[in-house]
Amino acid sequence: MALSPLQRLEDRVIQSEPEVQPTLTYSLDFNTGDIDGMIDGEAAIRQFISKVIMTARFRFPIYYDGEYGCELIDLIGEDLPIELLRSEIPRVITEALIYDDRIDDVYDFEIEREADKLTVSFYVDTTDGLTLDVVEEV
């Protein structure tokens, strides 16, 4: 049947469900740099979160569009007051993660500084209905 402006809108519109893409990816061993099989689902999202936080944005040509990575490197190593870190780190991490289609929300940040170690914990809600508790040393 051909489309015609004389047809009712309901007859011209074709409803389709978005196709769910798999999250299947390589499993990376961050300590050795080796690839160790394949992962999917929650494990793939957790790996994505860790990898994005570890990757400096705008520093690697492979991520040419500037959307991948995090700008934490600009904050770490500076002698910044903890109050500034508590306001900037959540913004920087949220901006790095929220563009991914699998992530709905990033919230409830807690930042602790112990000597030279900075630990960030937060929650991530996924489109699959999961709530992930994430703890990263930055």
Image (cartoon, rainbow, N blue to C red):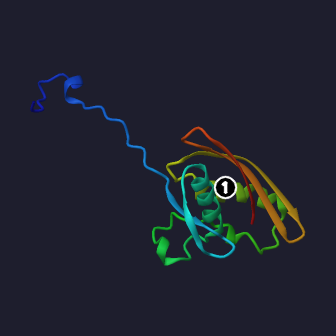
Give me the residue at 46% from left, 50% from top: 22
Task: Pick the residue in front: 74 or 46.
Answer: 46
Residue closest to the far front = 37
Up the image or down, 56 lies above or below 83; here it is below
Disc 1 marks a residue whose amino acid type is Arg
Camera-side residue: 25 or 66? 25
> At x 30% / y 31%, what residue is drawn?
15
**Relative to 88, does residue 74 appear above or below in the rendering?**
below
Residue 72, position as x, y percentages in the image:
68, 67
According to the picture, the residue beneath numbered tag 1 turns out to be 91
> In which quadrant will I find the C terminus?
bottom right
Label 1 secondary element? helix
Residue 81, given in percent of the width and then of the height, sits at 84, 64
Q: Position of 16 compared to 110: left or right?
A: left
Q: Which one is nearer the viewer's eye here, 35 or 7?
A: 35
Apparent side of residue 61 relative to residue 12 in the rendered image (left or right): right
Residue at horizontal 19 percent and vertical 29 percent from the top: 12
